[in-house]
Image (cartoon, grey):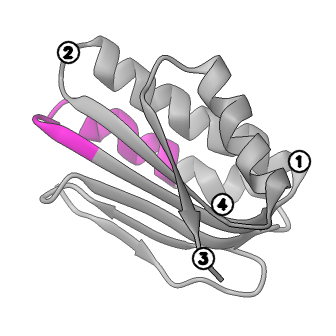
Amino acid sequence: MDSINIEGTPKTPTISFDAETSVIEIKGRSIPENSIEFYKPLVDWLDKFADVAQGTVNVNIQLEYFNTSSSKCILDVFKKLENLQNRNRAEVVINWYYEEDDEDMLEAGEDYQSILKIPFNMVEIAE
């Protein structure tokens, strides 16, 4: 299964979905013109990955900012991961990184955590 690697831009995050290592990373800013179009290949990839995933899937989310439409798409990504875990294919661990003075980003991670049944690690980054 192929991995997905997308270089970040000022409006889109850097994406690394690696099937071989079971490490999924989203980093940077997420304010694409069309969030659904940007995130659809990631959601589709997770559907295929669910058939081969095993062991622990580590998900590293380190966003400095995301808009409302991105938040819905990120939730769709998390729901695919939750389904993967519910099928007993793999254990999913989400590492939600936020800067120490960014209470909005911490709160966003906590909001996702309250919706999902996946373990979240809130990881503070010192500036």
Q: What element carries label 4?
A: helix
Q: Nearer the viewer, mark 2 or mark 4?
A: 2
Q: Residue at x 19, y 28 (%)?
A: 90
Q: Which residue is drawn at 19% across and 30% down?
A: 51
The first of marks 1 and 4 along the sequence is 4
Crowding at label 1, few (<14), some or many (≥20) Cα neighbours within 10 Å?
Answer: few
Q: Which of 41 and 56 is in front in this view?
A: 56
Q: Distance between the residues labelled 1 and 3?
A: 26 Å
The amino acid sitting under disc 2 is Asn
Asked if residue 56 lies in the magenta stretch, the reply is yes
The first of marks 3 and 2 along the sequence is 2
Q: Nearer the viewer, mark 3 or mark 2?
A: 3
**Magenta highlight range:** 42-57
Give the percent coordinates (x, y) of residue 12: 69, 74
Asked if residue 5 lies in the magenta stretch, the reply is no
Residue that badge 1 annotates:
68
The first of marks 2 and 4 along the sequence is 4
Q: Quadrant of residue 16?
A: bottom left
Against 59, residue 27 (above or below) is below
Residue that badge 2 annotates:
88
Residue 38 marker: 4
Q: Distance between the residues labelled 1 and 4?
A: 14 Å
The amino acid sitting under disc 4 is Phe
Q: Which of marks 1 and 3 is in front?
A: 3
Residue that badge 3 annotates:
126
Q: Quadrant of residue 31?
A: bottom right
Q: Distance between the residues labelled 3 and 2?
A: 35 Å
Q: Which residue is drawn at 30% across and 21% down?
A: 85
Q: What element carries label 3?
A: loop
